[in-house]
Amino acid sequence: MTSTRRKTASEARWRARFRVWSVVLFLVTGVALVRVACAAEAVEASIDAARIRERIHVERLAADRLQADMSTLMAPSRIRRIAGDTLKMRDAARVRFITVPDLDRAAAPLVAAKPRAVERSPRSARLVSTIMDMAAGEAQVLLLGDVGLASAK
């Protein structure tokens, strides 16, 4: 009986060792798989970063080209040439600037003297301002519209 007990105890020890080594092997395998997965994700992120860097470079080149084109299109000599050729415009012989005084300063003397004039003055100033804004808008539309048509040719 002692030999069967020894045999059973020896088998129990080997089974315990086998279980311990199986668990250790399983843990080492799991750690190795996690390490490989992390390395693969790092490589994938590196590849994505390289692609993004390349796209950024391409977009910066395109932005630089567009900026150069814009400065070429906005050159005063080009606009002067298009205005002369397309719209038959020429340089003004004499330039005059019209200034509209500040309404508060202009209306201050009128407030003390004539209250009714204050009502008419802001209206007329608003009317003149509105007419000037409309004229400037029309001129801008005409100029930009023809410049756009001339640059498309």
Image (cartoon, helix red, strand yellow):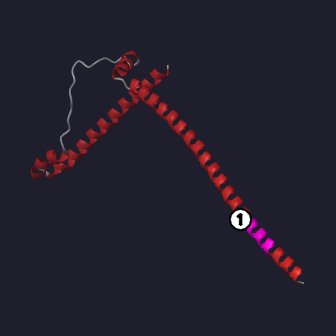
Residue drawn at the location 30% of the way across and 40% of the way down: 130
* Left or right: 120 in relation to 78: left
Magenta region, residue range: 13-24
For this orientation, the residue located farthest to the front is 2
Q: Nearer the viewer, residue 9 or 128?
A: 9
Q: To which quarter of the image does residue 142 belong?
A: top left
Q: Which residue is mark 1?
A: 24
33 left or right of 114 in image: right
Relative to 122, say whether 98 is above or below.
Answer: above
Magenta span: chief secondary structure: helix
Would you say residue 20 sits in the magenta stretch?
yes
- Give coordinates of residue 18: x percent, y percent: 78, 68
On the image, which quarter does residue 55 sit in?
Answer: top right
> How many numbered marks have been drawn onto this rendered protein structure?
1
Residue 14 screen position, x and y as percent: 80, 71
The answer to whether 52 is drawn above or below residue 26 in the figure is: above
Q: Residue at x 39, y 19 (%)?
A: 82
Where, quadrant-wise, is the N terminus in this rendering? bottom right
Establish if 122 lies above or below 65.
Answer: below
Whole-percent x and y of residue 26?
Answer: 73, 63
Residue under the image location 12 percent in, 48 percent down: 110
**Is 76 part of what is drawn in magenta?**
no
Q: For the residue carrying disc 1, how many other residues have a C-alpha within 10 Å: few (<14), some (14-19), or many (20+)? A: few
Give the x, y percent position of residue 114. 12, 50
Closer-to-camera residue (143/33): 33
Query: With 16 as the anchor, is 46 left or right in this view?
Result: left
Residue kind at label 1, given as amino acid type: Val
Camera-side residue of 137 and 16: 16
Question: Can you tell which quarter of the image residue 6 is in?
Answer: bottom right
Q: What SS does tag 1 mark?
A: helix
Residue displayed at 69% across by 60% down: 28
Residue 16 in the figure: left or right of residue 98? right
